[in-house]
Image (cartoon, rainbow, N blue to C red):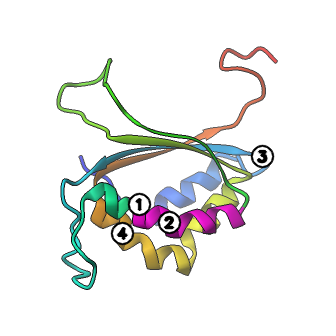
Amino acid sequence: MSTLKHTQEQLDDLDKLGLNTGPIIVLTLLQYRVEADYSEHPEQSPCSGREAYGRFIQLVYPMAVKLNAKVVFRAPILHHLIAPKEERWDDFSIVEWPTVSRFKELLTSEDYQSITFHRLAALENSRVLVCEREAGDAYGRV
């Protein structure tokens, strides 16, 4: 199932997690369209989905930095070692946010809403996973 937009219910569910006291990690998986779908914005020049996502990143990155978000890692996905054959992801990113409320502040801002058409034009599918930032390494040793 293709998923490109969050719902208000999903944003409300973030509050129920009780994670607003410390940092969170947001993992995003991206599957690009071959050609961006700017049918609702014909003033945009044609480009690939990857290029359209680049347009989105150029606009959203300064907004995220103002809210103290940090890009921890971003890279293309080269191989799907353990995944269904039909599942394909092109890129992923890991971003650390100081709190859930800062992340939500971005997602609900008018500035963000005004540029999401680039994201929607760019992507065939996506996943945005919110994780708690824990001290220590992945196996619990501090």
Name the residue rendered at 25%, 36% in the picture: 88
The residue singled out by tag 4 in the image is 118
Whichever of callouts 1 and 3 sits on the residue coming sooner in the sequence is 3
Residue 105, how many percent across, how many down?
Answer: 64, 68
Whichever of callouts 3 and 2 sits on the residue coming sooner in the sequence is 3
For numbered disc 3, what is the local secondary structure?
A: loop
Which amino acid lies under the numbered mark 1 shown in the image of this protein?
Gly
- Label 4 environment density (alpha carbons within 10 Å; few <14, some 14–19, many ≥20): many
The C terminus appears in which quarter of the rendering? top right
Task: Give the quarter of the image for residue 63.
Answer: bottom right
Q: Is residue 120 left or right of residue 21?
A: left
The residue singled out by tag 1 in the image is 54
Question: Are circles 3 and 2 on residues that touch, CB within 8 Å?
Answer: no
- Label 2 environment density (alpha carbons within 10 Å; few <14, some 14–19, many ≥20): few
Name the residue rendered at 19%, 25% in the picture: 85
For numbered disc 2, what is the local secondary structure?
A: helix
Q: Is residue 109 magenta?
A: no
Q: Is residue 40 left or right of residue 114?
A: left
Which amino acid lies under the numbered mark 3 shown in the image of this protein?
Gly
Q: Which marked residue is nearer to the observer: mark 4 or mark 3?
A: 4
Whichever of callouts 4 and 2 sits on the residue coming sooner in the sequence is 2
Task: Give the quarter of the image for residue 79.
Answer: top left
Which amino acid lies under the numbered mark 2 shown in the image of this protein?
Gln
Whichever of callouts 4 and 3 sits on the residue coming sooner in the sequence is 3
Q: Is residue 42 above or below residue 91?
A: below
Cα distance between the residues tagged 1 and 3: 29 Å
The residue singled out by tag 2 in the image is 58
The residue singled out by tag 3 in the image is 22
Q: Is residue 57 magenta?
A: yes
Name the residue rendered at 22%, 54% in the picture: 33
Q: Is residue 128 above or below residue 51?
A: above
